[in-house]
Image (spheres, coloured by chain):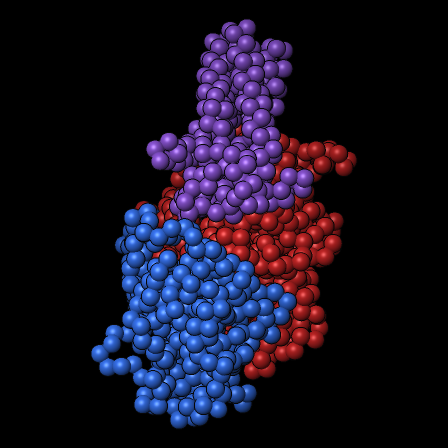
Chain colours: A blue, B red, C purple
């Protein structure tokens, strides 16, 4: 990469070229106007230089026509930039429905990642080409930012909430991962790699790195060991506490009368601050688990609850070999609505 | 041929504001806006050098990819302090507190600002804030980034956050009082005949700047105060571990800090209007459009803060609104650039140093402003956020824009302020050196940013080294270039050629008193009967070109 | 023509008022500048308090039950009395300005004294309230080491703080944090106002003000009214939340 000086980083995601195209448009317009203004300035400065010490040029008051022209034209150009940028942004922002989920916890000064199939990684993320990957991220301490220049995307990783980003890699290779929000002493050391592999290689990697269980299965263990089952039932069927099976992605009614979506944030909040949004018809008896579960464990519990789709557990399909693992049974609706 | 000084020159006077009274007390307890301007000039130059030394340390460290010059913790303090000093203690006060204080009363025909004692108070408040901040720097420094994002600044940083915050809080009042003074002065103390649309555009800019100062600064004041209290009392407004919202801090912070950048650049644009008109001997093309653009920038500037939060998980719809408004705020600036350029058409341009700075401003501000469009554009900003592209963008505006205007203004009004001329040859030379050094420093950073080099990085991957080496080379040229005026301005105070009342032969009201002016500016209040930048009555204008005698409209 | 026409005195006054500052042309201009200056300053104060109002709004919508619980515990009687005191003080201040304008010195001084007394009454009552917060362990965090914030619900009940459904102590602490920040900042402005009133009083007794020169009275009156208005917003937002809940159910 040192042999010639490139102007853009590697293009490795489906959106990279779109961002680059807009960038080149912006660069072109910038170059055009900068050169135009500079050229006009230099021309005027030479052509109208002072020739005699006492000359005074004729005053020119202005021109409404010109003012209108050079208000409208820049505004129109600006709107094209806005529109194009907003359109690509919408694609960047909205994670597609059938993405593989990876859970990310950022902390000073490292990245902890866990695949939905259980593999854990530190400062590295192996992903297959051609699959949509969605990251669900949070921080254990301060704000970080998960930045992959090759994918032209980043998202802040904020303590106290989940943020998401998605991408689909197009080219195998190893790409930089940077932390892009100043986070303290070793901010510049909080870097890593995204390793994009061909689907076959990725499967090999998966099987060679069988983790300690999927986040969902680890979440299940926590569900038991933390005593959630005593109120919510062995399989989330409910009891003294609301039913959890099948609840993810649905709307639920609160005591105050309003209804909320059971999304990632609501699940997390309910574990840490159960009194905040009580489900209608249940007493305020759930204790808080603030301080007793780490961010990793919260993500695992979340994965478990998501997996309780009407009582069936499901592991997300891996790239290219849907027959090898528990594929989603045909006909059962996916619960991963967010 | 009739000389262009067709008005009566002022009665020369041996007593001026500098020698009217001697002694430290007469300076430290002065109510004269001109003396207060000089007090500010000394202090902000001091802070500029401190900020500059930090900049030098940053660029030295970034020569090599490894973090080998400074320790990581030190580096973090250095870039934080570079930002804090340069923004709060140099850029924000720079033009308003020095050139503004000196010239606003003179340009409108007044004897002083509306509240001279509050003016002096604002300088002492500035000093107090500065002293507290310097104490924080010497005691151990602050490492949160000038943006103080939470919860790092409330909970995790082990540095002097509260002391620095206090210094910034106090300094904010200096800004507020200066803005208040300007607004009241411009409204109530214009000389007879000085209608709003006869005001120099320098005044319009300072008026718009003052609006931002008084509306925005209180918000950063309360934000910094809440931050400090949270750090001390450990109650969570911003810390999520205590139930607070870290993004709330960012909203409150940027609600001021975005308009703040217009505080930094609007006065400079006002200076540029003066430079372009006066050194091409022509009224500004589209005067009222430039005037209203200043106000538009001030108003719109308050509506775009969310473009600093595009990647913070802010809602996508909020993102779109802020993106749209951010494009809208660029339009008035573009209008100004076009009007300045059009002013030069069929004018009579001299190549004096101030004009060089004015031209430099137009070119560099165009690049800086247009690279801002990259950052307003949502999809591209997602990639460029927190990279060196952003750093390059704002340095083009702050240094290529604001600083150029400041230096141009200093040179332009130096004879009025000091009664001496600076050496013109050295002036032009240093302007050129600064221009070249500046571009070499920051142009490579755009490329490095798009390639993915994040900002605030102490060590970086080797593929970014070539850009950093170019940048550091440029920085040393830039630093050298800026030392030259520092030397010759001081030199000129003793050895410079004595300046007459109106050395540039210009019609502005400030040139109709002696150089340096007497304490009361004008012996008697002038009555204004001419338009802004009226170089000669139309019927006496020597024709440059082949048009008829009436005022020309294209 | 572009001459600088030298003008002599622009007003017909042969003398200058002793209070005319030399950089102003006449008293009219000086008065106008002073009044505009105070209005501009008050706008900055609105922006300053605005940040805190924003924080209040956000956290109230986030934690309504906690805010209602905490607000119920505030002493509504004292708060209402204080509101009345301040409104009355604004009236006496306005009367003082009026009397200065018409040159009636005795009533003007009397009204100033009343305003000052009422202002100090407000501060006194505030002090009583703050003291009861100290006794009830409601000062956030460990600001007062000897009296840290309530630690658990039992202790809260002991001190008369009843937590509504869905409220947690941490959120209640946040309410009190905002309460002290806002009322404390307000009280600071009142203290400054009291100081300004004292100056006014001294100068009034010395006879410095007359119908031609009363701008300081007017301008400080503006400031006083502003401080009053801030309280009129603070009172319902801090004291009157959820009162209907308490008595209704």
Residue B190 seen from this side? no
Q: Residue C197: x, y in percent?
A: 58, 20
Residue A326 seen from this side? yes
Q: Who's the residue at 61% across and 33% down the image?
A: C135
Tell me which corner region of the image, top left, top right, bottom left or bottom right, holds residue A44: bottom left
Q: Who's the residue at 31% across and 64% down the image?
A: A247
Looking at the picture, does residue B369 appear above or below residue B121? below
Looking at the picture, does residue A202 appear above or below residue A294? below
Q: Residue B244: x, y in percent?
A: 50, 52
The residue lying furthest to the right in this view is B23
The residue lying furthest to the left in this view is A331
Looking at the picture, does residue B79 appear above or below residue B489? below
Looking at the picture, does residue C62 appear above or below residue C108? below
Report the front residue among A49 and A89.
A89
Residue B160 appears left or right of A62: right
Q: Who's the residue at 30% across and 57% down the image?
A: A252
Residue A119 appears left or right of B425: left
Q: How many marks?
A: 0
Q: Who's the residue at 54% across and 9% down the image?
A: C110
Report the front residue among A234 and B467.
A234
The quadrant in which the C terminus of chain A is found is: bottom left
Report the front residue among B469 and B195.
B469
Q: Residue A220: x, y in percent?
A: 43, 72
């Amino acid at each position: 990469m040192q042999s010639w000086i490139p102007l853009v980083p590697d293009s490795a995601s489906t959106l990279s070229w779109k961002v680059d195209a807009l960038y080149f448009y912006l660069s072109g317009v910038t170059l055009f106007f900068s050169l135009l203004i500079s050229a006009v300035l230099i021309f005027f400065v030479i052509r109208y230089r002072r020739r005699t010490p006492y000359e005074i040029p004729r005053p020119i008051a202005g021109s409404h026509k010109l003012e209108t022209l050079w208000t409208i034209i820049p505004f129109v150009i600006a709107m094209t930039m806005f529109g194009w940028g907003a359109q690509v942004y919408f694609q960047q922002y909205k994670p597609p429905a059938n993405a593989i989920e990876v859970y990310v916890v950022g902390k000073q000064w490292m990245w902890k990642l866990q695949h939905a199939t259980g593999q854990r990684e530190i400062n590295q993320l192996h992903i297959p080409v051609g699959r949509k990957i969605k990251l669900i991220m949070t921080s254990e301490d301060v704000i970080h930012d998960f930045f992959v220049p090759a994918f032209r995307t980043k998202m802040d990783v904020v303590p106290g909430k989940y943020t998401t980003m998605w991408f689909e890699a197009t080219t195998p290779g190893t790409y930089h991962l940077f932390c892009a929000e100043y986070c303290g002493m070793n901010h510049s050391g909080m870097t890593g790699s995204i390793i994009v592999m061909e689907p076959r290689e990725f499967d090999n990697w998966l099987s060679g790195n069988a983790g300690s269980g999927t986040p969902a299965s680890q979440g299940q263990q926590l569900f038991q060991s933390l005593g959630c089952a005593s109120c919510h039932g062995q399989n989330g069927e409910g009891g003294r506490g609301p039913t959890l099976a099948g609840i993810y992605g649905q709307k639920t009614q609160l005591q105050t009368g309003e209804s909320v979506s059971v999304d990632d944030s609501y699940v997390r909040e309910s574990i840490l601050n159960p009194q905040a949004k009580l489900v209608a018809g249940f007493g305020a008896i759930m204790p808080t688990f603030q301080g007793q579960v780490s961010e990793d464990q919260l993500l695992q519990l979340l994965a478990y609850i998501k997996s309780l789709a009407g009582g069936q557990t499901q592991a997300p399909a891996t790239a290219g070999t849907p027959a090898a693992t528990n594929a989603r049974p045909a006909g059962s609706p996916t619960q991963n609505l967010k | 041929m009739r000389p262009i000084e067709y008005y009566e020159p002022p009665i020369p006077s041996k007593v001026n504001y500098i020698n009217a009274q001697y002694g430290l007390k007469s300076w430290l307890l002065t109510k004269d806006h001109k003396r207060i301007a000089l007090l500010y000039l000394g202090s902000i130059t001091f802070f500029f050098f401190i900020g500059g030394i930090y900049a030098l340390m940053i660029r030295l460290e970034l020569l090599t990819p490894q973090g080998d010059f400074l320790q990581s913790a030190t580096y973090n303090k250095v870039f934080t302090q570079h930002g804090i000093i340069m923004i709060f203690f140099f850029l924000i006060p720079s033009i308003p507190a020095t050139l503004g204080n000196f010239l606003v009363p003179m340009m409108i025909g007044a004897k002083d600002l509306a509240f001279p004692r509050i003016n002096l108070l604002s300088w002492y408040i500035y000093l107090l804030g500065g002293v507290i901040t310097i104490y924080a720097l010497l005691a151990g420094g602050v490492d949160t980034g000038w943006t103080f994002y939470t919860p790092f600044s409330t909970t995790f940083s082990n540095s002097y956050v509260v002391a620095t915050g206090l210094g910034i809080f106090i300094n904010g009042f200096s800004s507020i009082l200066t803005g208040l003074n300007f607004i009241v002065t411009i409204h109530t103390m214009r000389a007879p005949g000085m209608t709003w649309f006869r005001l120099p555009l320098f005044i319009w800019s300072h008026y718009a700047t003052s609006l931002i100062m008084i509306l925005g600064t209180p918000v950063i004041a309360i934000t910094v105060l809440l931050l400090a209290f949270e750090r001390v009392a450990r109650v969570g407004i911003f810390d999520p571990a205590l139930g607070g919202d870290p993004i709330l801090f960012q909203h409150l912070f940027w609600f001021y800090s975005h308009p703040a950048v217009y505080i930094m650049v609007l006065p400079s644009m006002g200076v540029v209007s003066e430079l372009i008109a006066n050194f091409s001997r022509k009224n500004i093309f589209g005067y009222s459009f430039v005037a209203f653009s200043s106000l538009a920038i001030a108003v719109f500037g308050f509506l775009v803060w969310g473009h600093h939060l595009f990647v913070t998980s802010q809602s996508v719809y909020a993102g779109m609104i802020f993106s749209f408004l951010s494009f809208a705020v660029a339009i008035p600036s573009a209008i100004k650039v076009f009007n300045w350029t059009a002013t030069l058409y069929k004018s009579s341009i001299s190549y004096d140093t101030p004009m060089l700075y004015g031209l430099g401003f137009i070119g560099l501000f165009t690049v800086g402003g247009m690279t801002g469009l990259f950052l307003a554009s949502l999809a591209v900003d997602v990639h460029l956020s927190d990279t060196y592209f952003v750093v390059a963008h704002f340095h083009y505006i702050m240094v290529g824009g604001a600083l150029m205007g400041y230096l141009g203004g200093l040179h332009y009004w130096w004879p009025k302020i000091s009664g001496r001329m600076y050496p013109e040859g050295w002036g032009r030379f240093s302007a050129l050196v600064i221009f070249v050094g500046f571009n070499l420093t920051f142009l490579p950073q755009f490329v490095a940013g798009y390639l993915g080099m994040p900002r605030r990085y102490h060590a970086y991957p080797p593929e970014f080294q070539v850009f950093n080496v170019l940048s550091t080379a440029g920085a040393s040229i830039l630093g050298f270039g800026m030392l030259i005026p520092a030397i010759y301005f001081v030199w000129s105070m003793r050895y410079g050629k004595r300046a007459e009342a109106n050395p540039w032969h210009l019609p502005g009201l400030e040139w109709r008193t002696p150089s340096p002016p007497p304490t009361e500016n004008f012996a008697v209040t002038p009555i204004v009967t001419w338009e802004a930048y009226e170089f000669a009555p139309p019927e006496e204008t020597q024709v440059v070109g082949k048009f008829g005698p009436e005022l020309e409209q294209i | 023509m572009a001459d600088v026409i030298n003008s002599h005195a622009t007003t017909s006054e042969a003398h200058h008022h002793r209070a005319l500052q030399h950089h102003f042309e006449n008293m009219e201009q000086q008065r106008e500048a002073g009044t505009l200056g105070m209005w501009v300053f008050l706008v900055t104060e609105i922006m300053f308090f605005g940040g805190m109002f924003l924080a209040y709004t956000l956290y109230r919508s986030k934690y309504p039950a906690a805010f209602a619980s905490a607000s119920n515990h505030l002493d509504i009687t004292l708060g209402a009395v204080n509101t009345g005191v301040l409104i009355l003080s604004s009236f006496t201040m306005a009367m003082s300005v009026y009397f200065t304008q018409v040159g009636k010195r005795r009533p003007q001084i009397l009204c100033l004294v009343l305003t000052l007394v009422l202002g100090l009454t407000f501060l006194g009552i505030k002090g009583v309230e703050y003291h009861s917060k100290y006794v009830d362990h409601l000062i956030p965090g460990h600001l007062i080491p000897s009296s840290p914030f309530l630690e658990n619900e039992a202790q809260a009940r002991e001190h008369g703080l009843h937590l509504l459904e869905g409220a947690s102590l941490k959120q209640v602490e946040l309410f009190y944090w905002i309460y002290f920040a806002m009322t404390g900042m307000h009280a600071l402005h009142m203290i400054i106002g009291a100081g300004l009133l004292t100056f006014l009083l001294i100068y009034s007794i010395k006879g410095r003000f007359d119908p031609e020169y009363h701008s300081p009275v007017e301008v400080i009156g503006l400031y006083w009214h502003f401080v009053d208005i801030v309280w009129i917003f603070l009172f319902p937002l801090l004291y009157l939340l959820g009162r209907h809940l308490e008595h209704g159910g």
